[in-house]
Image: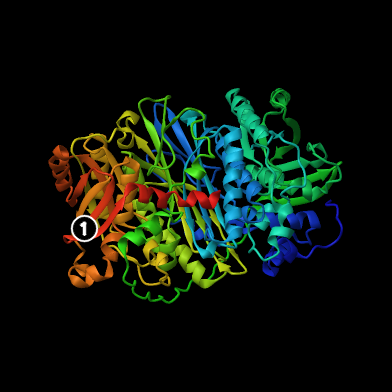
Amino acid sequence: MVTALRGALDPARVGLTAAEAATIRTALGREPNAVELRCFGVLWSEHCAYKHSRTVLRRLPATGARVLQGPGENAGVVAVAGGWARVLKIESHNHPSAVDPYNGAATGVGGIIRDVLAMGARPVALLDALRFGPPDDPRSRRLLAGVVAGIAGYGNSVGVPTVGGDLAVDPAYRDNPLVNVACLGLVRADGVARARAAPGQVFLYAGARTGRDGVGGAAFASEELDEHAEREDRAAVQIGDPFAGKCLVEATLAALATGRVRGVQDMGAGGLACAAVEMAARGGCGAVLDLDRVPLREGGLAPEEILLSESQERMLVACAPEDAPALAAHYERWGLAAAVVGRATADGRFRARVQGAVVADLPVALLTGAPERHVVPRQPPVVPSPPVPPLDPAVLLLRLLAAPELADRRAIFEQYDHMVQVRTVVPPGADAAVLRLPEVPPLGLALTVDGNGRWCALDPYAGAAATVLEAAANLACVGAEPLAVTDCLNFPSPERPEVAWAFAQAVDGIADACRALGVPVVGGNVSFYNEGPRGPILPTPMVAMVGLAPDVAQLASTRGAGADPPVLVLLGDGEVTLAGSLCARAVGVRPGGTVPRPAFERAVRTLEVVRCAVREGLVVLAHDVSDGGLLPALAETCLTLHRGARIALGALPQEAGPSGAAAGWPLTLFGEGGTRVLCLLPGSRVPALEALAASARVPVRPLGVVGGDALTVTVDDSPAVHLPLEVLGRAASAFAEVLA
């Protein structure tokens, strides 16, 4: 018999709709008590149950010859070589970071590390993808500084390097920043762990003690933020301890190596209840928890607080009863709490007890079977974009180089320890980070994360597909071939028809781009309800991609740039636009217009040529043309080389003639789109590159020579830009002053 606790509880207070509450009553044949209702509120939350997204996410390609584990576990697993596999996962911690930026970001790092750990993998690298309001907004600056400090504080202390990231700003993120963190891990292919239990096994609690922090965090992540969130929702933000996190990582890896662990799950969103229920569901069994056995940090916790607390640095281990004492003693030697708190049963029910009294008794299948919600999608009308006014290319270039998307971000990267574990070959700031794999030399893994909310706001399909192609281009620039993708889909409320349409379009764009590249999506995260009093965020799918580099010694970005004479050429092409561009934003043009749909087959051919050119040593340096267009990419390359360049461009057909010159050739210099890569190489190797490109029907356009101390650009023989490197560098470093 279930003990009634404090009478009835309004289902709406735990985030359930009236229809969902009725479904629960019908399935149980009774009214759920307060503890049970709170369990439903968390396990049926959008954050845990994916009610609005499950059907759409099935469109993503999730299989492949290398895939050992796709969606459905804590993280995806893909075989690499030599019996090793890599684990990849990305998660969001948007709402907590809006309320408490340091702890919200820090616990986001801790949570994603434990997701990778739960697959039996050692975490070896982190990436962050961040979105904030404009830097002239004081709150946005404070949030950015706090988030970066939180990522650094946890990642550095736990000993996992942050090797790269992506940053953009827009007024749409003022109320609701985006903090997405990806983690890469390594595991033996025959040592992949699973988060499941079997009847007869016991549940061993291991890690930090349970407190009240983070109670209801999963439900909090499934709500919109209001003007009181920063003050009233702070209790829903977890508090991390990276030193306990480090001990938990090492203790769990050592425990897995003993062979005694049968299953392991992070106690993240939904806490102990969610961990036990998910392990039982995956194992097709039930679970009984004795809450008075749970190690507590403080007295007086109610049953639902013990069940749903999201206190950090905790794992739930399934093991044979006879192995529990040895495992508990093992964790205690690491200074961590450990106790058997329950067992797996064969009856398919989840029960929680306090001193023998049952305070919750629910079917596991019902707890994990939240009904899907279907909103009829509606495409919003296309908003026309006014023309870009005439501009001075030099003035605009300097303005763009100072923007967070293009600026020198060393002020951020230098807070991160990117060399811990001594794997990093290509550090933060390049197109992609690269890690050496001493387990299977000379192989390396390349990592990147990208997002393009500006394009997705205009065309979510094209924007999401372009995001995938840009990630693949970043990997190609270091000679790496894509292995797998994990995505974090950040959107406003899915209850609005236009958001439902944008979400489905974005997923289709990711799916089609990944199929074109032959890359599986092995996991990810959906974050809805990202909006605040001043409106919703831009639709912002983030894509983290990992690739395989055959020889880290042959990476283009690790070679010297002293070739004589060095030249710059442009590989690839494609339709470009000023709609949704940094140029349009910088000159104050209202967002609107249309962006080009991706040319997948042409992009795939271009990226294959880039990869081959890098691997064969034809190219000294490669850099993709993306945010800001061609002219900023040229300036970034010059700053990387610490050398100037003399560039001669031909105007795009629509800008040829006096009218284009009078307008400043905005499309030619600042248009975004297509798949284009700048390549630096000795002039003597240009014929070989042209032959390689011709074999794949990829255009090659010589741009000019490298040298001197200024960037000089002409368009149709007319002067466009002449800026000393010193001036370019000052503009690019201006963002550091914002962070100071």
Is residue 442 shown left or right of residue 50?
left
Residue type at the position of mark 1: Thr
Is residue 704 shown left or right of residue 466?
left
Please give the count of numbered marks on the rendered protein.
1
> Mark 1 — residue?
714
Is residue 364 at all visible to an observer of this figure? yes
Is residue 671 at all visible to an observer of this figure? no
Is residue 379 shown left or right of residue 287?
left
Q: Is residue 272 above or below residue 262?
A: below
Percent position of residue 44, x then y: 65, 57
Query: As rendered, which of 714 and 444 lies closer to the eye?
Result: 714
Percent position of residue 443, x then y: 36, 29
Percent position of residue 48, x then y: 62, 53
Query: As rendered, which of 244 and 34 lies closer to the eye?
Result: 244
How many residues crowd around disc 1 within 10 Å: few (fewer than 14), some, or many (20 or more)?
Answer: some
The residue positioned 13% from the left and 43% from the top of the image is: 691
The residue positioned 29% from the left and 65% from the top of the image is: 666
Query: As rendered, which of 605 and 593 lies closer to the eye?
Result: 593
Q: Is residue 619 above or below residue 486?
A: above
Is residue 326 shown left or right of residue 164?
right
The colouring scheme, among rainbow, by chain, secondary structure or one colour, is rainbow
Q: Secondary structure at mark 1?
A: strand
Percent position of residue 522, x then y: 46, 45
Query: As rendered, which of 567 and 250 lies closer to the eye?
Result: 567
Q: Is residue 427 above or below residue 108?
A: above
